[in-house]
Amino acid sequence: MSATALRIPHEEPERRDLLSWITTTDHKRIGILYLLTSLGYFGVAGALSLVIRTQLSRPNNTLVSAHEYAQLFTLHGTAMIFLFVAPFAFGLGNFLIPLQIGAADMAFPRLNATSYWLFLFGGLTVFLGAATSEGAAASGWVAYPPLSEIRVSTGLGQDLWIVGVFLVSVATIVTSINFVTTVFIYRAPGMTMWRIPIFTWEMVATSLLVFMAFPSLAATLLLLFVDRRLGGHAFDPAFGGSPVLWDHLFWFFGHPEVYVMILPYFGVISEIIPVFSRKPIFGYTGLVLAAFAIAGLSMGVWAHHMFTTGVVNNPFFSFVSFLIAVPTGVKFFNWIATMWRGSISFETPMLFAIGFLLNFLIGGITGVMIASPPIDYQAHDSYFVVAHFHYVLGGGSLFAIFAAMFFWWPKMFGVKLDETLGKWCFWLLFIGFNVTFLPMHFMGVLGMPRRVVTYNAGGPLPILNLIATCGSYVMFVGVALFAYNAIISARSRIPVGSDPWRANSLEWWTTSPPPEHNFDSLPPIRSERPVYDARVRAK
Amino acid sequence: MTIGLRLFISSATFGIVIAIAYWSTSREIIGTFMLGIMAFGLSFIAGYMIVAEREADLIGDKKEATMADGAGEIAGTYTIRSPLPLGTAAAVTCVFLGLVISPTIAILGVLATLAFGALLIVQSR
């Protein structure tokens, strides 16, 4: 970096009014806006899932019609994947990356703010479909043609879905460019690439994955839009098109998207476990290389979602899918080795991190199972697959999201969340989650297909579904308890200081919450744990 | 060679290898094309970085650098507030919403996008 720099005018008093939030280009505020917006979408998606589970609580239920049910699971999946799990990670990245590398802001602050607003408007556009005469999109979050084509989905809801998801995908690509540029260019003196925190590394890997995968989504959505509105036939076999083309193009994005939704949370776990084990992270370099190995390999597995089409090279995709288990296993062993003989304390962030490990292990193992084509032929489109990806994204990402909130809440807002309520929240979510999703493995093995509005009485399916529904209500109580915790913590106004967890990375050096210019001073950066080093020096 | 450059060169190499491996084993056009595009894009970024790195002298890459090494002339200040991002995003949304709902909204969106884009350029100077 040259010796000239643009500086934030930090002599200005910090404004807290609504207008200052709407016009902000400060990465921390944009990060918080991302987090709150994605949590809002999570609330809506969670409410939709409760309706879904209530509908399935007993056989031959008529709470919602088949078309309404299709809209419910479409909006639920779309909101959870495009509007919650991935954007929450981008919110965390926005808040944390400049702080972790000792920068004053993102490389392109106004572009960053533009990305956030595009994400917000894109999400609202998706939900706007529910207000149209024929309702929201109803072709699932994967929008397979011909279900998503104009001759089947005649309403505006599907078009609004396409436009909304397209806007979100553009916002995601732009934010990723911002992340990578910021990390490459704006690191503080001494913050070499091999000293940046694992979370920031994971966000770099995630951004790289976004560069590779999301253009495919954007292009595919435009093709579908041309099919629907301009008379195109890209996916219509009657005119030389092919629905399998959609499968290829969509899953070229879709499977890497799974890793876009999990790699940042690997980073979260890698930040939390060392702090509460009172040990440095085991195998820093291995964790970084494993992240990039996962990102790279994930670009070669898209058609394992298409094993049953019979038109893809099953052995190739199966082999590469199995390979991903190796770097993922490396990470898992590194986390366990970090805890091994550590002085572990079980504060709420650590509980959620351990919950992540247990749930993700189950999701990972079932993932290896269905990477095998013979098993996938049996499990495809059944509740076994629903259980698998909920263990990865719910038991994995969602638990890491709660871990992140409890861990970085003091840094964001200057107050801690209540520990007792936090532990209650953890146990309700952990028990509720497993009661909801563990039975779904058995439903799938028994042959219950996914995305069906109801099922017949008789056999074990009714009781398994009822158990799953009860679990979802327990999860709802856990989430409500978190919301209550957030409200009372905001009222408590008990300051926590800059480093309440005695953590390691640079964000814990500055005040809580940080000033607009982030740092009044920085410690010498000589390892990946500069704040720990400073504590040792102070002794 | 910086880590960033190594990252993109490795990724581009991986992209080329997997594209060749996929075509060799599958003879399938769509996936090979997508992997090829991906490898080309990554190679392009790597190539750009090779050129750009000639002038790179990042203080963050220096292991023993101190805060004082990073200090220097202050070229100016930038605002941490601007209404233009919200306006630009709203305008772009109108363009695409207009394609679904009404061409008038789309045209207004295009005009607004151009206006906000021009303002952004002016503000950036």
Image (cartoon, rainbow, N blue to C red):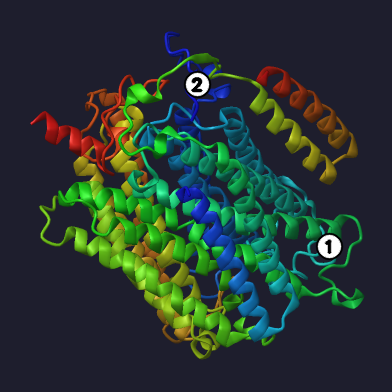
Q: Residue placed at 35% from the left, 50% from the top?
A: A198
Q: Residues within 10 Å of mark 1 (few under 14, many from 20)?
A: some
Q: Quadrant of the C terminus of chain B?
A: top right
Q: Chain for mark 2?
A: A
Q: Secondary structure at mark 2?
A: strand
Q: As displayed, is residue A254 above or below residue B122?
A: below
Q: Is residue A258 left or right of residue A233?
A: left
Farthest residue to the left: give it. Answer: A539
Q: As displayed, is residue A310 above or below residue A148?
A: below
Disc 2 target residue:
A5
Residue A93 spot, x, y in % from top left: 45, 42
Q: Are marks 2 and 1 on the same chain?
A: yes
Q: Nearer the viewer, mark 2 or mark 1?
A: 2
Please name whichever residue, A20 or A193, is drawn nearer the observer in this view of the structure: A193
Please name whichever residue, A232 or A151, is drawn nearer the observer in this view of the structure: A232
Disc 1 target residue:
A150
Please name whichever residue, A391 or B50, is drawn nearer the observer in this view of the structure: B50
Q: Residue placed at 49% from the left, 61% from the top?
A: A259
Q: Secondary structure at mark 1?
A: loop
Q: CA distance from mark 2 to mark 1?
A: 53 Å
Amino acid on which the number 1 mark rests in the picture = Ile
Farthest residue to the front: give it. Answer: B54
Residue A232: in sight, yes or no?
yes
